[in-house]
Image (tube, rainbow, N blue to C red):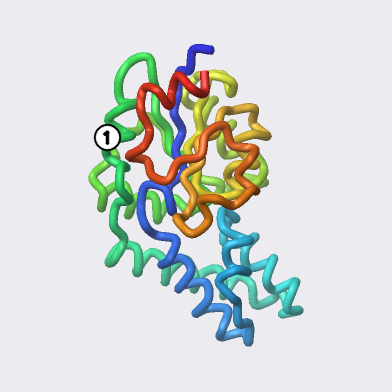
Amino acid sequence: MQYKAAIFDMDGLLIDSEPLWQEAGIETLAGFGISLTLEQYHTSTGLRTEEWVAHWFRIYKVSPEHAPEAVETIIRKAIEKIGRDGVALPGAADILDFFNQPPFKTGLATSSPMSLVDVVVDKLKIRDRFQVFTSAECLPYGKPHPQVFLECAAALEVLPEECIIFEDSFNGMIAAKAAKMKCVLVPAKEQLTHPRWSAADLVLASLLDFSEESLNAIR
């Protein structure tokens, strides 16, 4: 198979923002009487904020009328925290250099809102590394639905099976496989050996570990 595009998730893959999203989410839910454990939090990474809030409100029986307020607060807090404290993850620049050459096109496909995408790509100075940016923010479905990846592939003018997805979350992996795309998974260090990554085509400890041999391995 000749791959023509590499599509990257953003949070937790290119920028170390997951702990900051975690802070924003847990702080906000605490205001509604919800106390999440880290294990609970990790089961829901990769969801859009609206779906994340709806998920925990449903479990803890909080009225959905409060959801818009919670979503707005989480996004505001996350943008503030990531804009101030977010840093590039190891290998982020290297992997974008690797794929910024023919025959590859590059896209970013995220569950986060475009307002945060703008903050991150400018903070990391990587805006010019991508031909396409897609967000599940305004799509009917977010991850684990494959729509955001399919939209990105269409905008790049490539077929789904010509794409390699780089992800860090379970929901992102499921979305990639549902889109019939190859998936390279770079999970959080403490989750690296979890058996749930078995559907990924390649699991790496760091983006720094990706190489020409890695590309050949998933062909």
Q: Residue at x 53, y 27 (%)?
A: 153
Q: Nearer the viewer, residue 163 or 153?
A: 163
Q: Residue at x 38, y 64 (%)?
A: 79
Q: Farthest left residue?
A: 125
Q: Secondary structure at mark 1?
A: helix
What percent of the width, then of the height, locates residue 124?
Answer: 26, 49
**Residue 164 percent location from the top left of the image:** 50, 28
Mark 1 neighbour density, 10 Å: few (under 14) some (14–19) many (20 or more): few
* Residue 131 in which image quadrant: top left
Horizontal placement of 29 versus 74: left or right? right
Instruction: Specify the quadrant of the image occupied by residue 91.
Output: top left
Which amino acid does the dot numbered 1 rest on? Answer: Asp
Q: Position of residue 168 (x, y in %)?
A: 50, 48
Q: Quadrant of the N terminus?
A: top right
> For mark 1, what is the residue?
128
- Picture layout, residue 189 above or below residue 157: below
Q: Is residue 120 left or right of residue 184?
A: left
The foreground one among 64 and 92 is 92
**Could you tell me which residue is drawn at 31 percent across and 61 percent down?**
86
Q: Position of residue 54 (x, y in %)?
A: 68, 66
Query: From this viewpoint, is residue 142 visible?
Result: no
Q: At 67% across and 71% down in the image, what residue appears?
A: 56
**Count of picture labels:** 1
Within the image, what quadrant is residue 200 found in? top right
- The answer, for residue 38, to whether it is visible in the render is yes
Along the line of sight, the residue nearer the viewer: 206 or 74: 206
Residue 31 lies left or right of residue 115; in this view the side is right
Viewer-side residue, 194 vs 128:
194
Compared to residue 132, the image places residue 10 above or below, namely: below
